[in-house]
Amino acid sequence: MYTCDKQWLAQDDSQVGDEEASRRTQIMAAPATTPEERGEHRLQFAYSLWFSRRAPGNKPNNQRYDQNLKLVCTFDTVEQFWRHYSHLVRPSEMSGHSDYHLFKEGIKPMWEAGDEANRTGGKWIVRLRKGLASRCWENLILAILGEQFMVGEEVCGAVVSVRFQEDIVSIWNRTASDSQTTLRIRDTLRRVLNLPINTVMEYKTHTDSLRYTP
């Protein structure tokens, strides 16, 4: 349903005639238009943005991690993304042990029981010196939304992790055993982040991550 802030109205309904009051009521009750009717540009997939923060000294575990995940927004058009993104705190301004997670709608940013899309997948990890996270994160999520990785549904999402000594960006994919696809993701990630050729990029399967999760 379409709604609007009454602050833009110069007069309330008690100060106008019946015809004008009726017109305003019809506008307020009008059904929501589609993104196309609003002139918005649909993304190929809908996405959800999550936020999490862990207190320093608290050891991570599956239950606490799930409880710390907070859904920020879900969007499926370019314009919706920018409306949300423009109000977000940038990674370089966040405190330590804070994370943003951008994932396709319906995929939760967890490897554990609860998300089949991540169960047999993995992630490319890039460790960054402090001061680079905001730029790299923006470049990465714009590349994902713009389908620059050219691997269809294989990309599940991305994470930026702010820590005290370094920051980390990672991109998650569905099928760790598909070496051709994982290498294509690696090469595209190197390009969109403009990484030097000697930058260390680590690939870790979620199965390996689970082995070291308490």
Image: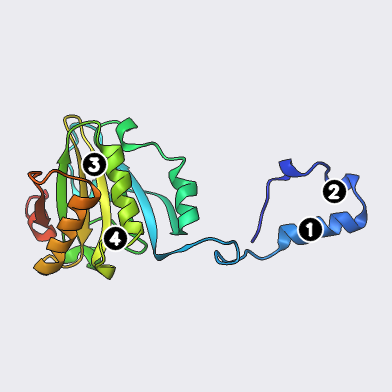
Q: Residues within 10 Å of mark 3 (few under 14, many from 20)?
A: many
**What kind of residue is marked 3?**
Ser
Element class at badge 4: loop
Question: Do residues under tags 1 and 2 come within 8 Å of each other at their CB atoms?
Answer: yes
**What kind of residue is marked 2?**
Asp
Q: Earlier in the sequence, mark 2 or mark 3?
A: 2
Q: Earlier in the sequence, mark 2 or mark 4?
A: 2
Whole-Å distance between the Cαs marked 3 and 1?
47 Å
Quadrant the N terminus occupies: bottom right
Q: Residue 25 has which mark?
A: 1
Q: Is residue 18 left or right of residue 25?
A: right
Whole-Å distance between the Cαs marked 2 and 3?
50 Å
Q: Earlier in the sequence, mark 3 or mark 4?
A: 4
Quarter assignment of residue 93: top left
In the rendered image, residue 189, in percent from the top left (x then y), is placed at 20, 53
Q: Residue 148 has which mark?
A: 4
